[in-house]
Image (cartoon, rainbow, N blue to C red):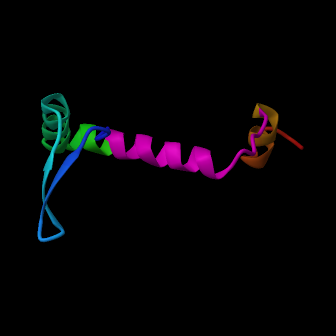
Amino acid sequence: MLDQVQLIKENDRNIFAVIPFEEYLFLQELLNDEEKLADYLDYLHVQKVKTQTSQRFSLGDVRRELALESK
């Protein structure tokens, strides 16, 4: 998202950002719907967490850790 942004400057200070209309519509819809915004923020968080760790656990490990099966 926002890969094609054009910044308009005045006195070396950004004063406007021009984005494709389709991205504007997407952002408008996203920001006007709390549930969609919450889902999108959850998605972004998951993507960030995925990049922070490469450790994976087996289903058995998770069940043991959550005490869903005996050790």
Left or right: 55 with respect to 9?
Answer: right
Q: Quadrant of residue 44?
A: top left
* Image spot of residue 43 (x, y percent): 42, 40
Q: Residue at horizontal 86%, vertical 41%?
A: 70
Residue 16 to residue 13: above or below: above
**Residue 70 forms part of the magenta stretch:** no
The residue shown at (32%, 38%) is 1
Q: What is the number of callouts on the image?
A: 0
Identify which residue, 27 or 23, lies in the foreground: 23
Q: Residue furthest top?
A: 22
Closer to us: 68 or 43? 43
Q: Which residue is depicted at the point 57% across and 49% down? A: 49
Q: Main secondary structure of the magenta part?
A: helix
Give the image location of residue 16, x and y in percent. Answer: 11, 55
Q: What span is colored magenta in the figure?
A: 39-58
List the single residue furthest toward the front. Answer: 11
Query: Residue 11 in the image: x percent, y percent?
Result: 12, 71
Left or right of 41 on screen, residue 27: left
**In the rendered structure, does residue 43 fall within the stretch colored magenta?**
yes
Q: Quadrant of residue 29?
A: top left
Quarter of the picture containing the C terminus is top right
Q: Of residues 51 and 33, which is closer to you in this image? A: 51
- Write the residue at 31% across / 45% down: 38
Q: Is residue 40 left or right of residue 34?
A: right
The picture places residue 39, in percent across and down from the top left corner, at 34, 39
Give the vertical position of 48 relative to 23 (above or below).
below
